[in-house]
């Protein structure tokens, strides 16, 4: 059979790498169309200084970078290597940065990157231009270095060409041809080129290309300054024209600077200037006088502070000056991640956008696997084209958040830090009441979510008087946190609390084909009585966990699904039966915004709620994991006896207009039981101690159900479902998600820290919390399958090792006696 015809738009580092990755998998009918010349196309790759620092808070991005280096090192080019492994050095000039480099050293360990913290003298020994007196230390990563982006592009294009790929310069794609919901080709000035698969790798032009097919790519072309000094005496004789550089690439993030050698000159990149978004409608006019359409003229005034700070750090620069520079354009996104995936409404149209040289080959490989094998081997949800909420696709949102991402690109970012711009976009009907109670709001998915309530400060005092401990924390882990959350968690276990569950993504899946769709897509058996609630998983073809859901059967053909976010909606949408299938017709509706939910949980939850409800909600009449449509007072509600915090109680849903009345009703009835409102931090600690996994953090598509400890939700005896075949083939897991308990109660890690066993890095933390119930700090960690309860581990947090023990799961209430009563 002939292979699908593939057209790639753009011959930058991404397009050329894609051509190589796709042809190497046997799809050799590949045409790469480039509007500029080859291979100095004029895109961002044409002038990329090519610094590759692998270590990233994201495991995925780190893996993309690692693969890129591995691949570039192996490429053949007549002019020499495509990668110069000079090493990477990041220096700290402030205590905060020095601490942050310790954290970064932790990620490097967690993701398997070789890296070491060095004192100032050792840094200066590696990079003699450094003024050791100015720095507190540095983080050295020997395998990082300089990509020769253009060479890498050419070398990969050559490999692809040898397998049959065709590269065509001066061929601008002017339009996309569609036929029957599928892409059929692209238009150029020379006519239509047929294609079964079109991949948009057009760099910062990508959003314009995608717009033609109704796709919003949340990226902003942004200018960034890069300058070169004149000859530096101290560099004389160090490098040859061929090698170009020998000193490590250098980052001075406290001043938004990075440096590399160009033989005997220094190149300086600067992120400290104001964000300079580029208006694409005027791009050709403003770049008319520059060398390339991705280059704007250098703006000296913006660079002045950079030059001053560069000389401070590298005094040897003072005998020179900035000789040349430009403001180069490349893409920024709202969350700093790339954008990958297939257009949902136009099969065959793919994007690989907002990709740094650093991650280029990794992104290309994952995209090729996705297109050819149906799923990428690397976990990519952070980069998924459909990860964005509706609100995040507005021009205003894209521009403001991407500009913020530019400003923060070298900032120290706390793992719990939330967006400050564009707040208040999504509020639940309880918002006013929460404000009255002094809620401290976090942002998540553009929702305002109470993290804790100032009103519970008194409760904290009361519990302290009763002997409850409120351990002190270090400054870093007490940011975006309050000890009030300990009181809230404790009170949930002792009495009762109300949690705003409105931001929990909810869908209604209904119609004659609804059950069949859910049976085919999820792992558990959903063919149960009306009123059943089931915990179930979405898997990909490889058996990896795409999501975990609760599914309530509210009518024979109507289900309410509790999900994890936009990616679930995307997955269901893609898998809906074909339009003409009337027998199997299914409607999928996101009902999150039109509804709201309060979780009422705690030992006295039933005492609080029963008097409001004419139905019997006793343990035997309204069983665990059942749903009931009823009334509380006059308010129509759907109650589900489900508890992510592991307590007796219900998620109580109603439509938005009843929301504030529902809150008031429960709050008034709750006075007699001393009900409190409790926030996300308490919620998170309770779910971790109860053993419940958070999708996206504790488990992802990288993990099979057994490894993540959720195989109880898989019915292998059920007829075929997505991922079943892969699970049948799977061997035993090599890594398992475990609960650990720390020795020290004041020691709370935040996530992604490395975990050691017998002195060797054995895994990493996913999520962590202080458990108010057992008065200890707890966490989940991915660890070798051979490790088990009782084994001692050490967790490195900001450079210090802390001892913990693997605990049997769940840490709290393994008998389920708190819930089933
Ligand atoms: P491009 O290289 O821009 O390629 C896209 C191609 O698509 C272009 O050649 C364009 O002509 C073509 N095209 C667009 N539209 C069409 C169309 N309609 N039809 C046909 N062809 C089309 N990254 C790092 O990893 N490390 C660094 O140190 C680094 N430093 C940087 C410094 C500066 C000053 C700048 C500007 C960027 C830097 N980057 C760095 C980022 C990096 O250069 C880019 O992210 C990367 O090169 C993007 O590659 P690409 O293939 O997606 O885009
Ligand atoms: N509520 C609802 N839907 C949800 C969540 C929720 N969907 C997304 C996410 N949270 C799903 N995660 C979980 C995890 C665990 C449980 C519920 C949702 C849970 N598990 C029980 C256990 O593991 O013991 C019951 C499992 C069973 O009986 O099969 O309660 O918070 N609506």
Image (cartoon, helix red, strand yellow):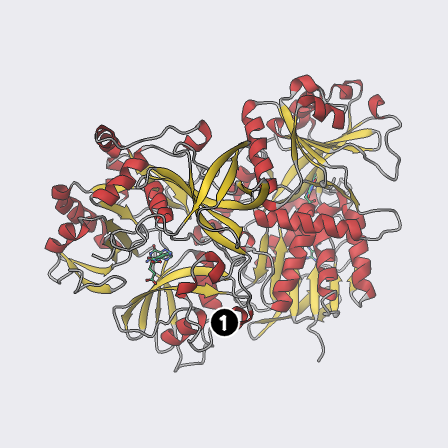
Residue 133 appears left or right of 546: right
Kindly identify which residue carries mark 1: 724
Residue ranking furthest to the front: 790
Q: Nearer the viewer, residue 187 or 317?
A: 317
Residue 90 appears left or right of 577: right
Question: Could you say whether the residue bearing mark 1 is in a helix, strand or loop?
Answer: helix
| Whether residue 572 is visible | yes
Q: Point out the quarter of the image occupied by ligand 2.
A: bottom left
Residue 163 x/y as whole percent? 80, 67
Residue at the spot 28% in from the left edge and 55% down from the top edge? 816
Whether 701 is drawn above or below 493: the answer is below
Mark 1 nearby-residue class (10 Å; few <14, some 14–19, many ≥20): many
Q: Nearer the viewer, residue 821 or 15?
A: 821
| Some atom of ligand 2 lies within 8 Å of the CB belonging to the residue at label 1 | no
So how many labels did they put on this image?
1
For the N terminus, the image quarter is bottom right
Residue 447 x/y as whole percent? 37, 46
Q: Nearer the viewer, residue 138 or 816?
A: 816
Q: Nearer the viewer, residue 600 or 122?
A: 122
Residue 321 x/y as whole percent? 78, 22
For the C terminus, the image quarter is bottom left
Residue at the spot 76% in from the left edge and 18% down from the top edge? 318
Whether 372 is drawn above or below 658: the answer is below
Answer with the quarter of the image where residue 189 lies. Answer: bottom right
Answer with the quarter of the image where residue 748 lies. Answer: top left
Residue 180 appears left or right of 23: left
Whether 366 is drawn above or below 420: the answer is below
| Whether residue 204 is visible | no
Answer with the quarter of the image where residue 449 lies. Answer: top left
Residue 635 x/y as whole percent? 17, 57
Residue at the spot 78% in from the left edge and 65% down from the top edge? 165
Residue ranking furthest to the bottom: 583
């Amino acid at each position: 059979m002939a292979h699908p015809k593939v057209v790639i738009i753009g011959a930058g580092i991404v397009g050329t790498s894609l051509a190589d990755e796709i042809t190497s998998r046997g799809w050799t009918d590949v045409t790469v169309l480039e509007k500029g010349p080859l291979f100095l196309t004029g895109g961002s790759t044409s002038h990329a200084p090519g610094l590759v620092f692998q270590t990233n808070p994201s495991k995925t991005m780190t893996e993309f970078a690692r693969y890129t280096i591995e691949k570039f090192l192996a490429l053949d080019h007549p002019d020499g290597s495509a990668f110069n492994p000079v090493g990477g050095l990041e220096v700290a000039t402030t205590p905060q940065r020095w601490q942050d480099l310790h954290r970064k050293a932790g990620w490097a360990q967690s993701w398997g990157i070789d890296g070491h913290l060095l004192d100032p003298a050792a840094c200066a020994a590696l990079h003699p231009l450094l003024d050791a007196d100015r720095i507190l230390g540095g983080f050295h990563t020997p395998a990082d270095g300089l990509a020769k982006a253009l060479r890498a592009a050419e070398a990969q294009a050559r490999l692809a060409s040898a397998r049959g790929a065709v590269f065509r310069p001066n061929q601008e794609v002017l339009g996309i041809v569609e036929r029957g919901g599928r892409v059929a080709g692209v238009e150029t000035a020379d006519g239509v080129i047929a294609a079964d698969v079109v991949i948009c790798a057009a760099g910062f032009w990508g959003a314009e290309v995608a717009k033609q097919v109704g796709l919003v790519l949340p990226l902003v072309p942004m200018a960034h300054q890069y300058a070169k000094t004149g000859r530096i005496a101290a560099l004389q004789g160090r490098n040859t024209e061929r090698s170009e550089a020998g000193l490590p690439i250098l980052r001075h993030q406290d001043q938004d600077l990075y440096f590399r050698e160009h033989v005997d000159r220094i190149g300086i990149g600067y992120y400290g200037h104001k964000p300079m978004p580029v208006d694409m409608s005027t791009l050709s006019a403003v770049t008319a006088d520059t060398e390339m359409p991705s280059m704007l003229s250098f703006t000296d005034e913006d660079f002045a502070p950079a030059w001053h700070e560069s000389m401070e750090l590298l005094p040897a620069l003072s005998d020179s000056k900035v000789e040349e520079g430009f403001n180069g354009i490349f893409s920024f996104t709202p969350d700093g991640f790339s954008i990958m995936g297939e257009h949902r409404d136009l099969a065959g149209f793919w994007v690989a956008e907002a990709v740094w040289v650093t991650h280029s080959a990794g992104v290309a490989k994952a995209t090729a696997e996705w297109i050819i094998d149906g799923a990428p081997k690397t976990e990519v949800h952070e980069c998924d084209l459909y990860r964005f909420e509706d609100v995040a696709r507005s021009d205003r949102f894209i521009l403001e958040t991407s500009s913020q991402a530019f400003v923060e690109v070298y900032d120290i970012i706390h793992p719990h830090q939330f967006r400050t711009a564009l707040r208040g976009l999504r509020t639940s009907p309880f918002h006013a009441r929460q404000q009255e109670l002094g809620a401290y709001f976090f942002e998540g998915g553009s929702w305002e979510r109470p993290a804790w309530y100032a009103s519970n400060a008194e409760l904290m005092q009361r519990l302290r008087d009763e002997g409850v401990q409120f351990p002190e924390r270090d400054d870093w882990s007490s940011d975006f946190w309050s000890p009030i959350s300990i009181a809230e968690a404790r009170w949930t276990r002792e009495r009762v609390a109300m949690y705003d569950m409105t931001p929990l993504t909810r869908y209604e899946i209904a119609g004659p084909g609804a059950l069949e769709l859910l049976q085919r897509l999820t792992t558990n058996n959903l063919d149960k009585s009306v009123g059943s609630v089931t915990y179930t998983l979405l898997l990909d073809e490889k058996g990896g966990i795409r999501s975990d859901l609760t599914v309530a059967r509210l009518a024979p053909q109507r289900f309410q699904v509790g999900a994890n976010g936009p990616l679930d909606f995307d997955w269901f949408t893609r898998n809906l039966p074909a339009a003409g299938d009337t027998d199997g017709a299914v409607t999928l509706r996101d009902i999150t915004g039109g509804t709201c939910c309060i979780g009422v949980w705690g030992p006295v939850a039933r005492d609080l709620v029963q008097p409001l409800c004419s139905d019997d909600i006793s343990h035997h009449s309204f069983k665990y994991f059942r749903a009931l449509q009823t009334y509380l007072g006059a308010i129509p509600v759907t109650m589900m006896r489900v508890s992510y915090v592991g307590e007796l109680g219900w998620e109580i849903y109603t439509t938005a207009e009843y929301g504030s009345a529902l809150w008031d009703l429960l709050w008034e009835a709750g006075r007699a039981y001393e009900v409190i409102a409790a926030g996300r931090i308490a919620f998170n600690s309770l779910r971790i101690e109860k053993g419940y996994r958070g999708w996206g953090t504790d488990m992802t598509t990288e993990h099979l159900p057994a490894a993540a400890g959720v195989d109880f939700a898989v019915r292998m005896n059920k007829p075929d479902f997505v991922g079943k075949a892969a699970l049948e083939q799977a061997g035993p897991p090599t890594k398992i998600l475990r609960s650990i308990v720390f020795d020290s109660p004041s020691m709370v890690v935040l996530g992604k820290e490395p975990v050691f066993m017998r002195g060797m890095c054995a895994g990493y933390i996913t999520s962590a919390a202080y458990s108010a119930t057992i008065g200890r700090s707890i966490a989940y960690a991915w660890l070798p399958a051979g490790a088990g309860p009782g084994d001692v581990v050490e967790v490195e947090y900001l450079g210090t090792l802390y001892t913990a023990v693997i605990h049997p799961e769940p840490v709290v209430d393994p008998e389920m006696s708190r819930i089933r009563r």
